[in-house]
Image (cartoon, rainbow, N blue to C red):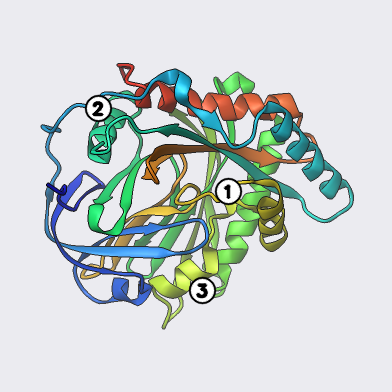
Amino acid sequence: MEMAAVAVLGHRLCSGLADVTDDLTALESEGFWAVAIDFRGKALCARFNSVRPARPWRGRPWKGLPADTWSSSLDRDRFASGVSAIRRMIADGDVYQVNLTRRLSAPLIDPDTDIAALGAALAEGNPAPYAAVIRLPGHGVHIASASPERFLERNGRWVESSPIKGTAATPSGLTPKDQAENLMIVDLVRNDLGRVCDYGTISVPALFSLEHHPGLVHLVSTVRGRLAEGCGWPELIEATFPPGSVTGAPKLAALGTIGALEPEPRGVYCGAVGWVDADRRQGDLNVAIRTLWIEEGHLHLGTGGGITYDSEPEDEWQETELKAKRLLAVASGERIGR
């Protein structure tokens, strides 16, 4: 028996699937929508009839996948080569920063694996402020996100984006390179929002804020603006997608470099997942990092980081390991306390 469509978003349990579309103008209509946009910009918007507070998970527990079955789209040497290639491009003036990622994959043991069970395990072992689960079996969508990063929050005409740049195991591990990286992306996000916001309304209410998350810390900044008349979700997403923190600067040049260096498409990883309440003109989309998804009989997880001229290949590799470590433990069935 096929599993029912369901989403858990912002502490809400959504059921009773009413409509599915790839048309972002639907987010300006009515109802409560679950939204998933993959890194290439392909959107899926699902409207649900029932939205109520999420309850503790009562389904089958997540059994986990063997820890030794995971493979990486880029091994250590190829990842290091990618870092070196980006540093050469920066030296030549082609880019300022590029986000380089790799995909970790493990074959599923049970074809009836439930992504909602993994989402519940992540909520326990890796709680995150922008966590999301979307299960749409009829559309091949199985996503469990433990994202710490906000891509876009909208409240009426006001929008905010809170890019993360700078990751370490402890605050003492953050460096001036992390601040420089963060500042570059803040400028990029300001420029992106400026395309659809009223002139003079773009501000940076928080710069280099320190946030603690399970197993690591991040530098986070916030950019805010007021949407111009006539601009809604379609225009906002078109102006800002993909998120600047997971592309690089300049964005178009960084995207070309990503396409050349990463052997596997990112899928939903580094895209956006979240909710939109069209009736209230509100919504919150995450940057789909710390995100796992099921596709073609495998469970996938992406991990990466921003590369600048000061990047050292081994340090960057270790950062990808740090970001993936806790999620891999949860996905492998280890019980981890908060």
Q: Within 10 angstroms of label 2, few (less than 14), some, or many (20 or more) residues? A: many
Relative to 118, say whether 96 is above or below. Answer: below
Q: Toward which corner of the image does residue 316 lie, by quadrant?
A: top right
Residue 196, labelled with which disc?
A: 3
Q: Tell me what residue is drawn at x 27 percent, y 28 percent.
A: 121
Residue 1, labelled with which disc?
A: none
Residue 62, labelled with which disc?
A: 2
Q: CA distance from mark 2 to mark 3?
A: 42 Å
Tell which tag, 2 or 3, sits nearer the viewer: 2
User: What amino acid is labelled 3 in the image?
Assistant: Val
User: Residue 2, image x and y in percent?
Assistant: 16, 49
Closer to the camera in the image, 155 or 268:
268
User: Residue 156, image x and y in percent?
Assistant: 32, 68
Relative to 188, say whether 231 is above or below. Answer: below
Q: CA distance from mark 3 to mark 1?
A: 21 Å
Badge 3 element: loop
Mark 2 and mark 1 in contact (Cβ < 8 Å)?
Answer: no
Mark 1 and mark 3 in contact (Cβ < 8 Å)?
Answer: no
User: What amino acid is labelled 2 in the image?
Assistant: Trp
Tell which tag, 3 or 1, sits nearer the viewer: 1
User: What amino acid is labelled 1 in the image?
Assistant: Val
User: Residue 131, image x and y in percent?
Assistant: 33, 41
Which callout, 2 or 3, points at the residue further toward the start of the chain?
2
